[in-house]
Amino acid sequence: MIEINQITTVFLAVALFALGGWLINKIGFLKRFCIPAPVVGGLLFAALTTILKTTGILEISLDTSLQSLFMITFFTTIGLGASFKLVKLGGKLLIFYWLACGFLALMQNVIGVSLASLMGIHPLIGMMAGAVSMEGGHGAAAAFGQTLEDLGISSAMTIGAAAATCGLVAGGLIGGPIVKYLVSKYNLTPDEQETEEVDFENKKEQITSDSFFTQVLLITFCMAVGTYVGTLFSEATGFVLPGYVGAMFVAVLVRNIMDKFKPDAINMKSISLIGDVTLGVFLSMALMSIKLWEIADLALPLFIIVFAQVFFIVLFSIFVLFKILGKNYDAAVMVAGFAGHGLGATPNAMANMSAVVQRFGPSKKAFLVVPIVGAFLIDVFGIPIIITTINLFK
């Protein structure tokens, strides 16, 4: 056995992140379906270690003790991006879309837990193929997977990563066909008179050493307070609240207090940069350390649950969400985004919508609503639903 220390593990995570990005640029399939770079690099390493172990050649042990630091940092940056002012910009359309995402998270957990119970496996394994990996994506799958493994649910992180990867590919595949069907059936066209302009705050911001340090100060403050909040809440109520969830909600409070008293203090370019880097390293570290050989027996149940999730979101998008959002071209484009981040991630949603508007025409409303909900607001419903499910079946 080779034991790789803490610092070398971080180096490997960063190197695999870079390798994944290089492979995506070289392999059209990966780029087309927006597979994240750390997923590519991390899963390649996991596959390599699986082959080495199962053939009896070598076993590799990684020190992933710094993984939680990167994870908490990422979720904190998500919280700092959740400005209530953005909700006002989207109006009723954003609220309806947001509520639909909350309903989807609930149904994804119902589907996952129900099918898992029917197939005789632990309900929380089904949950890992529910809202955690579908709406939550690889980040939530790794984070909550670790929480479940700490509760004694073996291979939860591996199952979540596998489900999230399947969902990511499915989300990229179904968005375009759904919109094509809706556009053809209802003869939809973009609004040529559309003049709305959305000036996202990070477009004009500049990164300086002083402003960057201020963001680091805010992030670490939220992390410190949030982890204590999570621990105290869990001890007082017996309700499992991971530290990264506490940090995220403290960050939401800090962001909106700062918006009121000192809005210039938040620099979203810096926040987004820190979030992107920490998410990449966190995912690389999480995926490179998964044990693929542990989920061989769950491959069929996992496929059945993911297929049911895809089937549900297609029906819900066409027959419910499209009509709720106004049954027009903007609604159709938002449905493409919904399929993308409802099964995968916000980059999937943006890729789906970009492909649609390149073919059929612009939709500024969709490009306002979907990123705000998909990147920032979705966890306000999703995480409480996931945590409640964990506590119901732990």
Image (spheres, rainbow, N blue to C red):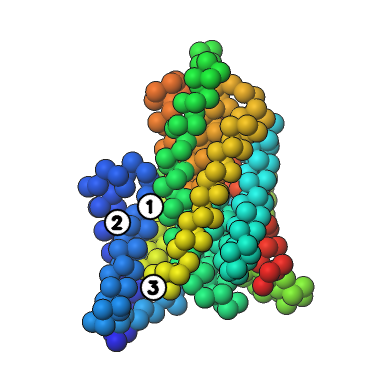
For the N terminus, the quadrant is bottom left
Q: Residues within 10 Å of mark 2 (few under 14, many from 20)?
A: many
Residue 378, label in figure:
none
- C-alpha distance separating marks 1 and 3: 22 Å
Q: Residues within 10 Å of mark 1 (few under 14, many from 20)?
A: many
Contact? badges 2 and 1 (CB < 8 Å):
yes
Of residue 344 and residue 210, the one placed in the foreground of this image is 344
- Mark 2 sits on what residue? 20
In the picture, measured across the screen, residue 92 lies left or right of residue 24, that is right
Compared with 301, 257 (above or below) is above
Q: Which amino acid is tagged 3?
A: Trp
**Image quadrant assignment for residue 283:** bottom left
- Mark 3 sits on what residue? 293
Which mark is first along the chain, 1 or 2? 2
- C-alpha distance separating marks 2 and 1: 8 Å
- C-alpha distance separating marks 3 and 2: 22 Å
In the picture, measured across the screen, residue 98 lies left or right of residue 59, that is right
Q: Secondary structure at mark 1?
A: loop
Q: Secondary structure at mark 3?
A: helix
Which mark is first along the chain, 2 or 3? 2
